[in-house]
Image: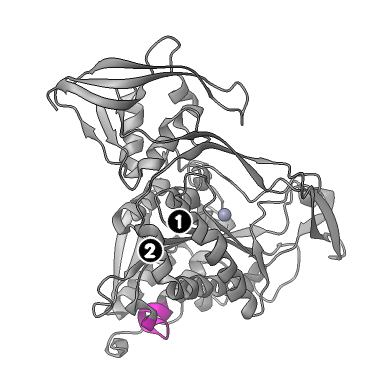
Amino acid sequence: MLTAQALPFPGDPPLQRNGYSRISSSAEISADLAAITAASDIARLEVLGHSVRQRPIEALVLREPNGAANPLRVLIVGSQHGAAEPAGAEALLRLARELALGELRPWLQELDVVLVPNANPDGRDLGRRANANGVNLNTDFVRAREPETRALLQALARYEPDAVLDSHESAVLKRKSLGIEGWLTDFEIQFETANNPGVPTPVRELGESELLPALLAATAANGIAAQRYIGEITSTRQPITNGGLTLRNFRNTAGVQNRVSILVETRLDSGEFEYPTWRNIAAREARQLHCLHAFLAVVHSRRAAIRAATAQPVRGDFALHASYQPDRDHPRIAIGLRRRDTRELVMHHFADHRRVALADAVAPPPAYLVTAARDLIRPVLDAQGIAYRQLGAPRGYRVLEQHFKLPTAAGGRATLVASAAVAREALAGSLVIELAQRRGRQAVLLLDPRSTSSLFRYPEFAARLGAGEPPPVQPVLAATGGNP
Ligand SMILES: [Zn+2]
């Protein structure tokens, strides 16, 4: 079955070649992906975009030409947080060898796999978590202003994966917060699914009730305990949640597009202690690889269920607003932390805020009409892959003209203060977004001011919701005439 022997073997990945003495550079990762591609008859290297500093963001596309007629499409993204979380990219170079040239190639009979090992090349080479503009990329998926964010959105649009893994590391030492209190977090692996309430129900339920337990079991079977993600613990006095609910992160943006979407966070050991390799990078890479194997095994074995869930048409009401609340039935949660000085494990009792309260359920209208602020909204639609058309001539519509009161405090809710069905003449150049598309719910969540993920939570968009003026985005009830 292996046909790669005649081609040049790429040798060891860069981390092994440098003896685990430092992380690989972005140039070394690019060179390694090129070497794997040259050595494999089933690998193709594609450029999704370029970073702020013009480094390529690359995807290794692995497709078995004699595989199943309709393979499940899988996308795995590593090291969005640059040099702060480098082990994902290193492990993905090992996984690339195993799939393209080694013992995992049989999985490609049923899976098309796309690997984006180094999602933030500038952050890696600058020694930081953010990109070169200082932006935490995993908070940029609503506005999509950074080129690295757009490259990952481009990966979703180009490959339309059924299943996505976003791979991160999480530091046990929060030097500026929990570390000051004298504590380290204590976990090996955490998994979470897309948790925004707009994620279509079949995909959401499959993720929570089947895939998450299967991932925990698959990692436990190999002797490493995993748990469901409980966010970042930065203080002994904070409440516990399951992490970000909005579309600001990649996991939820992928999920709301009707894909199975999983986050993994592996333990990032502190630089304060002695390890056999640089900051324990060999063990960290092994933990990441362990999770990549577990994810592919679970996705491969559940491929029929994943395909069935993602093939269902998206319909029904969903909530625009979600927030974590105290849980009266389960007010406290016990979590072990390690003392920073002695590393002794001590149980702490945290307030349990993992219950999600929903508000503002909506049934999406057939379409949205965008009559103003097109200079701001259109680039977002383009970056997100949301389909729309532009009116070439004026046209009459019956729309729901809604007026909102925006929240005055961060985390507050926008409220609907007036709503009336009115006839509107949309000028040429107005945009029409049909919402019966894969990204229909995403469009609603980005454009309705009541949504926790709304563009109108950002000042440049909020400024366009002028008091007394018609809002720039209106739900369409019907087209009433004029040239289409
Ligand atoms: Zn991260």
- Say whether residue 401 is left or right of residue 225: left
Say what amino acid the circle numbered 2 marks: Ala
Where residue 30 sits: x, y (%)?
A: 38, 65
Q: Element at badge 1?
A: helix
- Say whether residue 58 is left or right of residue 81: left
| Residue visible at 28% across and 78% down in the picture | 67
Sequence-wise, the earlier of marks 1 and 2 is: 1
Which class describes the residues within 10 Å of circle 1: few (<14), some (14-19), or many (20+)?
Answer: many
Judge whether 384 appears above or below 280 on screen.
above
Who is closer to the viewer here, 165 or 367?
A: 367
Who is closer to the viewer here, 435 or 473?
A: 435
Quadrant of res 409: top right
Judge whether 376 appears above or below 470 on screen.
below
Which class describes the residues within 10 Å of circle 2: few (<14), some (14-19), or many (20+)?
Answer: few
Q: Which residue is mark 2?
A: 308
| Residue visible at 37% across and 65% down in the picture | 307
Where residue 144 sits: x, y (%)?
A: 41, 40
- Say whether residue 136 is left or right of residue 119: right
Give residue 202's mark.
1
| Residue visible at 71% across and 59% down in the picture | 172
Who is closer to the viewer here, 359 or 103?
A: 359
**Separation of residues labelled 1 and 2 (CA atoms):** 9 Å
Q: Which stretch appears magenta?
A: 97-106
Task: For the residues labelled 1 and 2, say whether their Cβ atoms are less than 8 Å apart.
Answer: yes
> What count of labels does the image hold?
2
Q: Quadrant of the N terminus?
A: bottom left
Q: How is the image coloured?
A: one colour
Residue 240 on the magenta segment:
no
Q: Quadrant of ligand 1?
A: bottom right
Is residue 417 among the parts visible in the rendering?
Answer: yes
Judge whether 461 appears above or below 174 on screen.
above
Is residue 429 among the parts visible in the rendering?
Answer: no
